[in-house]
Amino acid sequence: MSTLMVPSVPPTPRDDAKHLHKAFKGFGCDTLAVINILAYRNASQRPLLEHEYKLKYSQDLSKRLSSELSGNLKKAVLLWMPEPARRDAIVVREAFSTNIDLKAVTEVLCSRTPSQLLHLKQVYLALFGVYLEQDIQSQTSGDHEKLLLAYLSIPRSEGPEFDRTMAENDAQALYKAGEKRWGTDEGTFRRIFSERSRAHMAAVGSVYKHMYGNTLKKAIKSETSGYFGEALMTIIQCAENPAKYFAKVLRKAMKGLGTDDKTLIRVIVTRAEIDMQYIKVEYRNKYGKSLNDDVHSETSGHYRSFLLTLLGPDQ
């Protein structure tokens, strides 16, 4: 569920382009005017606006935004403009190339659906002239690398159906591969987690708890480590409840000293049009406070206004 507040009768892309151009002109940029347009346009409206801007002013809108804005606001707005697959591709490529951030790579790849991943791979190749798999091979290693490559290449169902017996067999196999033995058989974890659908993995999680009294998440925590463990956790949490997973990621980004703005921007921007309503509910349930309030206290200025607009009003 999207939290985006789009006007019921939105201005035409031509009007938007005109108003943006006006906001850029003169001394300094009318940043508020820019936010008031872009933060209220959805994924189908933004490309039309970009197209119109280029037509009218023979300039790339994102390039113009890049020169007019600065700091975290600039990062958030520039990430907001592209369509979702392109945005994911940009996030992953940046996490591989500038400041290596394998956590971000793992979060994006392991939280997306098979059809989203397919689209991401195509866009990645078109944008950067390199296969996503090649970048994974050069930047990751071991079980983490093998799991990501398998997760990207194996087609999984996106429907709600699963086979109970198969879920029981998988739960048993995971127990044998982890808690029951000394040392962990990572291959079994890798195989099951990369080959099964979300609905199936959620069933495996619930069967596991029923059969062994311990959660699969606890087993992953005690049996695996590093980015491999992180990838398994992301897959199981997004199978069970993606909104709860992202609420946790956001909380972590704001907890303690200083704010991890990169994560804050990435999650709010990429989930605003998908499941932000649910993330806000999970956040309040788990932490007893509103996500909007926490974002408000951790950010400031136009950057704060932009993120809060994407979050939508507090329920």
Image: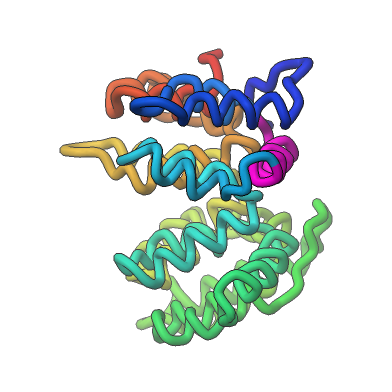
Q: Vertical placement of 29 versus 173: above or below?
A: above
In the picture, the quarter occupied by the C terminus is: top right
Tell me where residue 129 sits by quadrant: bottom right
Task: Give the x, y percent position of residue 188.
Answer: 56, 81
On the question of residue 270 being in view, the answer is: no
* Depth check, front residue: 55 or 248: 55
- Kindly identify the residue that appears in the image at 75 percent across and 68 percent down: 156
- Kindly identify the residue that appears in the image at 28 percent across and 22 percent down: 297
* Depth check, front residue: 207 or 6: 6
Label tally: 0
Tell me where residue 43 sits by quadrant: top right
Residue 191 located left or right of residue 105: right
Query: What's drawn in magenta, residue-wise?
Result: 41-55
Residue 283 located left or right of residue 101: right
Q: Main secondary structure of the magenta part?
A: helix
Inspect the magenta stretch and tell me whether residue 49 lies in it.
yes
Task: Give the x, y percent position of residue 125.
Answer: 63, 76
- Kindly identify the residue that appears in the image at 58 percent across and 35 percent down: 272
- Kindly identify the residue that appears in the image at 48 percent across and 59 percent down: 91
On the question of residue 1 being in view, the answer is: yes
* Depth check, front residue: 7 or 284: 7
Task: Give the x, y percent position of residue 41.
Answer: 65, 30
Residue 17 located left or right of residue 175: right
Inspect the magenta stretch and tell me whether residue 308 lies in it.
no
